[in-house]
Image (cartoon, grey):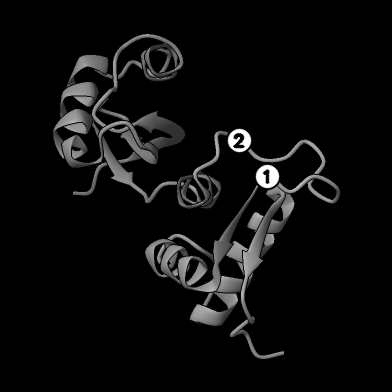
Amino acid sequence: MAKQISGIIKLQVKGGAANPSPPLGPALGSKGLNIMEFCKQFNGRTQDQAGKILPVVITYYSDKSFDFIIKNPPVAVQIMEMAKIKKGSSEPNRNKVGSITWDQVKEIAENKMRDLNAFTLESAMSMVAGTARSMGVTIKGESPIKK
């Protein structure tokens, strides 16, 4: 017989650095889950991505057991890494803080494709380009996206 799902928790945790302090501890502890067990499993699975912010979806069951899925880093974080900036612009329509190329946009879209709500690579690239634009990051070169 299948386990009965009690709920889902969505968090963003640094890879290889999960610990029981807030926000992780209270989020899991309030549901009665074993915080240290989650931290050990998460850190074990994310050692190769240490320091990167990773979204994680935790499904917990009525018997206090849990499963979790680790997703790719958010698009905004990947754009900041590619453009080598600390944060996006406070006024993206006026102040540009960095730039990336269309090849980098394609690389981010391919990396994030399974997490995005897009069927084609072109639509995923369009989503990434929109995120970059809203962060004040310009995209160099000619757009390969057909209009």
Res. 8 image quadrant: top left
Helix, strand or loop under label 1:
loop
Residue at the spot x=40%, y=70% of the render? 110
Residue 121 vs 49, above or below: the answer is below
Disc on res. 97 = 1
Q: Which amino acid, by three-letter code, is at mark 1?
A: Val
Asked whether, in this view, residue 132 is left or right of residue 8, the answer is right
Mark 2 residue crowding within 10 angstroms, few (<14) / some (14–19) / many (20+): some
Asked whether, in this view, residue 56 is left or right of residue 129, the answer is left
Front residue of 46 and 23: 46
Front residue of 115 and 108: 108
Residue at the spot x=56%, y=81% of the render? 122
Residue at the spot x=37%, y=51% of the render? 72
Q: Which amino acid, by three-letter code, is at mark 2?
A: Lys
Tell me which label, 1 or 2, sits earlier in the chain: 2
Mark 1 residue crowding within 10 angstroms, few (<14) / some (14–19) / many (20+): many
Q: Pick the quarter of the image with the C terminus.
A: bottom right
Q: Position of residue 114 (x, y in %)?
A: 40, 65
Asked whether, in this view, residue 100 is left or right of residue 8, the answer is right
Please identify, in this view, whether the residue under mark 1 or under mark 2 is nearer the observer.
1
Q: Are marks 1 and 2 in contact (CB under 8 Å)?
A: yes
Q: Position of residue 37 (x, y in %)?
A: 18, 21
Res. 59 image quadrant: top left
* Circle 2 residue: 87
Asked whether, in this view, residue 120 is left or right of residue 95, the answer is left
State the CA–CA distance, disc 1 to disc 2. Answer: 8 Å
Residue at the spot x=41%, y=68% of the render? 107
Residue reaching furthest to the right? 94
Disc on res. 146 = none
